[in-house]
Amino acid sequence: MTEAGRPPETGSPLRTRLRRRARRSNLGARAGPLIALLGLAGAVSIGHPLFLSAYGLNTLASAASVIMLLAAGQFLPISIGSIDLSMGALTAFGTVLLALWLPHLGPLAVPAMLIAIAAAGLLNGLIIVAFQMPSFIATVGTLGLWSGVSLVVSSASAVSVTGGYRVIAWLNGNIDRVPVSFLFAIVVMTVLGGVLTLTPVGRLALYAVGLAEPAAQMSGVRVAIVKVLCFAAAGLFSGLTALVLVAQDISGDPTSANSLLLPSIAAVVVGGNAITGGTGGMSRVLIGALIITVVQNGIGVMGINPFYEQIVYGVILVAAAGLTLDRSAIGVLK
């Protein structure tokens, strides 16, 4: 056994298991989602050639940035075998806070909002760890909490940005026809991916908790701290998503992110990340987010009733979870 807080030794059974899991996941989970993405985009473009035009790709990239950021945050709890159902509500709350604070705080409104939403995510983690509560139950409760607070603070209506918009206006621009919000999401995901692959915190602790929490605990990983940090980071990513939404809509809305939770979860699993945790990465989250964005926009351009979107997400979620589920890590199915 290692000292508390140190990663397992090179020859430990836990590290060996992590490597074997990574090799298995690399074989089957990378090619499939990428083929699906290319196939979906090609199928829609056959019926609507403008779908992959310069304008169409710009629209896709702008829409994808929101899903990319929220899915990147959702990946963190999922990677440890948990889930955060409050991220949509936290994102909506973040849009309201930013719209209210920008006219009064100016540039300080952005870090103030990000800190507030990250603190709300931190609260999720503390509740889960302190009360040994399943993440599903805890975040369902905080989903209702923050949804209610958003409605109260905004008087149940959209809040227009009446001043200070120039602070975030750059996120709604383009660089050589590429949306800045998309580039912003790519940079943030790249930084997170680097942390997950290049540091012991991501490379060992995070995936070890998702793969085998008791073994990680005995190997010296501070499981409680890892969990709290994952949910705090998920809150931060909710805030970053809110930042992009306010830049795009020039307003905050307590219901603006209600429809984003299911697509963000679907993006994580359809990209090939195991719903049970222990494996995956940002490249898969990116592909999954692009698949979901193509589905969203494809339904629109093909004239399909938008109500069918939820059916599609449900089917995608069940199918992807069934394909990525690590049944060897589950003793009893309930």
Image: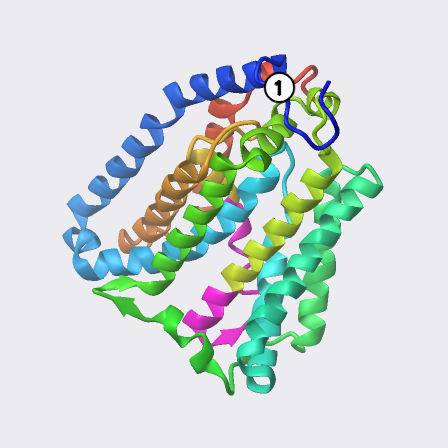
- Name which residue lies at 58% across and 29% down: 204
Q: How many marks?
A: 1
Can residue 315 be seen from the camera position used here?
A: no
Residue at label 1?
A: 9
Q: Quadrant of the C terminus?
A: top right
Say left or right for 27 vs 261. left
- Name which residue lies at 30% across and 54% down: 303
Say left or right for 20 vs 43. right
Q: Quadrant of residue 109?
A: bottom right
- Name which residue lies at 47% across and 66% down: 245
Of the pair 136 and 241, the residue shown nearer to us: 241
In this rendering, the answer to whether 67 lies above or below 326 is below
Give the class, few, some or many, for how many residues have Cα within 10 Å of label 1's Cα (few <14, many ≥20).
few
Magenta span: 243-264
Q: Quadrant of the N terminus?
A: top right
For the residue labelled by badge 1, is the local secondary structure a helix, a strand or a loop?
Answer: loop
Please state the horizontal and vertical placement of residue 161, each as a whole percent of the image: 51, 82
Is residue 80 part of the magenta span, yes or no?
no
Please state the horizontal and vertical placement of residue 178, each as a whole percent of the image: 26, 61
Please state the horizontal and vertical placement of residue 36, each as a whole percent of the image: 31, 33
Residue type at the position of mark 1: Glu
Please state the horizontal and vertical placement of residue 47, each as a whole percent of the image: 17, 47
Of the pair 108 and 42, the residue shown nearer to us: 108
- The residue lying furthest to the right in this view is 131
In this rendering, the answer to whether 79 lies above or below 115 is above
